[in-house]
Image (tube, coloured by chain):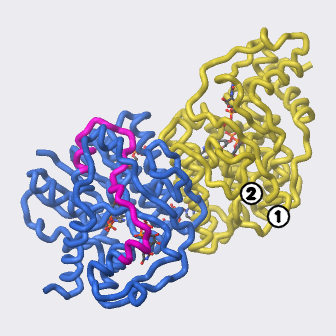
Chain colours: A yellow, B blue
Amino acid sequence: VKRILVTGGAGFIGSHIVDVLMLQGHQVTVMDNLFTGRRKNIEHWMGHPNFEFVRHDVVEEYMIEVDQIYHMACPASPPHYQYNPIKTIKTSSQGTLNMLGLAKRVKARLLFTSTSEVYGDPLEHPQKETYFGNVNTMGPRSCYDEGKRLGETLCYSFREELGVEVRIARIFNTFGPRMHPSDGRVVSNFIVQSLQNKKLTIYGDGHQTRSFQYVSDLVRGLILLMNSDFSDPVNLGNPDEYKIAEFAKKIVSFISPDKSPDQAIVHLPATKDDPQTRRPDNSRALSKLNWKPEVSLDEGLKLTVQYFKSEIGLAT
Amino acid sequence: VKRILVTGGAGFIGSHIVDVLMLQGHQVTVMDNLFTGRRKNIEHWMGHPNFEFVRHDVVEEYMIEVDQIYHMACPASPPHYQYNPIKTIKTSSQGTLNMLGLAKRVKARLLFTSTSEVYGDPLEHPQKETYFGNVNTMGPRSCYDEGKRLGETLCYSFREELGVEVRIARIFNTFGPRMHPSDGRVVSNFIVQSLQNKKLTIYGDGHQTRSFQYVSDLVRGLILLMNSDFSDPVNLGNPDEYKIAEFAKKIVSFISPDKSPDQAIVHLPATKDDPQTRRPDNSRALSKLNWKPEVSLDEGLKLTVQYFKSEIGLAT
Ligand SMILES: NC(=O)c1ccc[n+]([C@@H]2O[C@H](COP(=O)([O-])OP(=O)(O)OC[C@H]3O[C@@H](n4cnc5c(N)ncnc54)[C@H](O)[C@@H]3O)[C@@H](O)[C@H]2O)c1
Ligand SMILES: NC(=O)c1ccc[n+]([C@@H]2O[C@H](COP(=O)([O-])OP(=O)(O)OC[C@H]3O[C@@H](n4cnc5c(N)ncnc54)[C@H](O)[C@@H]3O)[C@@H](O)[C@H]2O)c1
Ligand SMILES: O=c1ccn([C@@H]2O[C@H](COP(=O)(O)OP(=O)(O)O)[C@@H](O)[C@H]2O)c(=O)[nH]1
Ligand SMILES: O=c1ccn([C@@H]2O[C@H](COP(=O)(O)OP(=O)(O)O)[C@@H](O)[C@H]2O)c(=O)[nH]1
Ligand SMILES: O=c1ccn([C@@H]2O[C@H](COP(=O)(O)OP(=O)(O)O)[C@@H](O)[C@H]2O)c(=O)[nH]1
Ligand SMILES: O=c1ccn([C@@H]2O[C@H](COP(=O)(O)OP(=O)(O)O)[C@@H](O)[C@H]2O)c(=O)[nH]1
């Protein structure tokens, strides 16, 4: 039994980690400022003797005695992290510094949730961990991308300079239950739009690609990584890659098979610096963690559509 | 007459800016923690009614009423910024945040001294400001490179989110009097080694290139940039490019023309992530600031060798 801190544990991914850790019998503390997370994601653990929720902002110093830290606190969806870019930068820089300072003091191991966004709009495809990326320092996505890049560098520096045990996951697009229905990401947008009989909004021509991983695969990978002895970055993602326009058609045929895509889709202006391709090279995760994704897009979508139906009051 | 803050003003470049600003009649405050800077670089202004020196660390909050901020506080030479990588990251992240917070509060304009290192080991040559770079987040240079990248992103975010007036200079390798004789950079190392009749230390095969700018050109560019209305990054550097091995020969023939390069040079192991090429594309500085470098390498070296001679007690 370990004492484990999950920052951002009331969010989408964090709350799924909490579930697994609680079922394994660990003592879990969630620290979250509830900016994008929701109390209901962890409600089922409230009152459990092994569980504690602390409303706290990771940008402020925080003291606790723990063995492991899953450091996930950071808004993840573009509309959320662009809501207050300066705050997003502080969360990734000062917040990660604080959690590394904590890890140093109590000799805990810290897992940092970095992102495929450190590769920016990649010129290498698929992306290996050795790729240095193609990131704009001066654009609407920079607060998130450069914040996460600096978070990795902080981890590296605490490891090299002070011997702190760090783990670094570069997470690729992930979906599943507990995504916020209005978080603005493509999976939630398309499913909710489709369920509400609205047109699916494609930004730009829809030729840009993403690869979608179901959340249970990611959570398994994160826990494997935390308990491995590998301290360099590891990609965690599903290589199953779609053009966004293809993906829109897939959602339409999944939810409203009677509609023609033309009726169901509308094109909006492209967003600035939108990565044009993204697909993980998973060979490092396979060789170091013996991990690979197992849930297919169709299986994942089934569970996710079910969740969104109940979320927006359409459960059958 | 303006009230001007120069952070890092006791350092090599900062002290030259101070000289020009003082001669222009401005009220100048130098804020510096004297980590790599030296009191003697600004000694000649001590006691002047328009001049003030404050020993302060930019990582800590700082209040002052000013019109312009030249934000230069940050160790610049690899041995210095690698001495305490975590401190280097704090200086660029928290330090730049503090100066932007100050700029916001007093409605000052801030010039951030970024670096050609944001291009990393560049795959585009020469480097334009539109190039996104090739930087490792996990290596010995990352604390400096990623710190400066985040500094740019902070400037961008304060500009976009709060309307703070920012200027961003990407400075390429600069040399001249007041470089610290033991700062470990190639110009100071080679000149001091040569003057002391020691072998010049080339890291690796010496095929890597750098382009060297004399400090007076840079200072003119920085002041032009500060007073321009252009708020995107601008390269400031001399495109005169040398292989480091060529540059070593040049220094030898300049200082000890009677020596054969073979006698005078020793190869040491290459350093990790050392950029293999570097040369600025200056077209933006030319079109936006009407700036181009004017001092040749030979002229600059003459003045610099003279300085190092007196610095190490060899003045004639
Ligand atoms: N979902 C993805 O596809 C994806 C991809 C790459 C990386 N990630 C990373 O995984 C982590 C979790 O993402 P998610 O999808 O669960 O997002 P989310 O927005 O659902 O969860 C983030 C959680 O962090 C909390 N938080 C934000 N700022 C905070 C602060 N300053 N102090 C304390 N708590 C704060 C939020 O309230 C929320 O509960 C993030 O770090 C994100 O960058 C996610
Ligand atoms: N010299 C170059 O070739 C070059 C190239 C690119 C960018 N730059 C940038 O220009 C600026 C000046 O560089 P330089 O060559 O004069 O270096 P320098 O080391 O001589 O000067 C830096 C100054 O900042 C001060 N300083 C460092 N950390 C500080 C802190 N936390 N608080 C307060 N003061 C602090 C030092 O004491 C020193 O006086 C730096 O920001 C550097 O990154 C220099
Ligand atoms: O239990 C702890 C220990 C440290 N920190 C924070 O972590 C950061 C870095 O810690 P470090 O020990 O390096 O502190 P510093 O040397 O900056 O005081 C600082 O902002 C601390 O406030 C924290 O939040 N909790
Ligand atoms: O309603 C939407 C939301 C997103 N996207 C596109 O889907 C991709 C993934 O966007 P998301 O915000 O989910 O994640 P990220 O860009 O961070 O990978 C991007 O190319 C977006 O431009 C879209 O076309 N319509
Ligand atoms: O005159 C000032 C004003 C602000 N700051 C610092 O600048 C940072 C960002 O300022 P902001 O006003 O955004 O502060 P916050 O919202 O973080 O309190 C904070 O760390 C402040 O302490 C400063 O050093 N001097
Ligand atoms: O004694 C030295 C110092 C530096 N260098 C090389 O000279 C170049 C410039 O190094 P410097 O530290 O001056 O600046 P930076 O690498 O930051 O441009 C790099 O390729 C170094 O490997 C060298 O060969 N011998």
Point out the image quarter for the C terminus of chain B.
bottom left
Q: Residue at left 35%, top 53%?
A: B113
Per the model, the C-alpha gap separating discs 2 and 1 is 9 Å
Q: Amino acid at mark 2?
A: Val
Find ligand 1 in the image and state its quadrant: top right
Image marks 2 and 1: residues in contact by CB distance under 8 Å: yes
The amino acid at mark 1 is Lys
Residues rendered magenta in the picture: B221-249
| Res B115 → quadrant | bottom left
Seen at 53% across and 74% down, the residue is B271
Residue B264: horizontal and vertical position, in percent?
A: 38, 87
- Image-based side of B57 in relation to B224, left or right: right
Residue at the disc numbered 2: A234
At x 79%, y 54%, the residue is A222
Crowding around mark 2 (Cα neighbors within 10 Å: few <14, some 14 to 19, many 20+) is many
Q: Is residue A37 visible?
A: yes
For this rendering, which residue is in front, A67 or B26? B26
Residue designated by label 1: A288
Q: Position of residue A159 (x, y in %)?
A: 62, 70
Labels 2 and 1 in the same subunit: yes
Say above or below: B248 vs B141: below
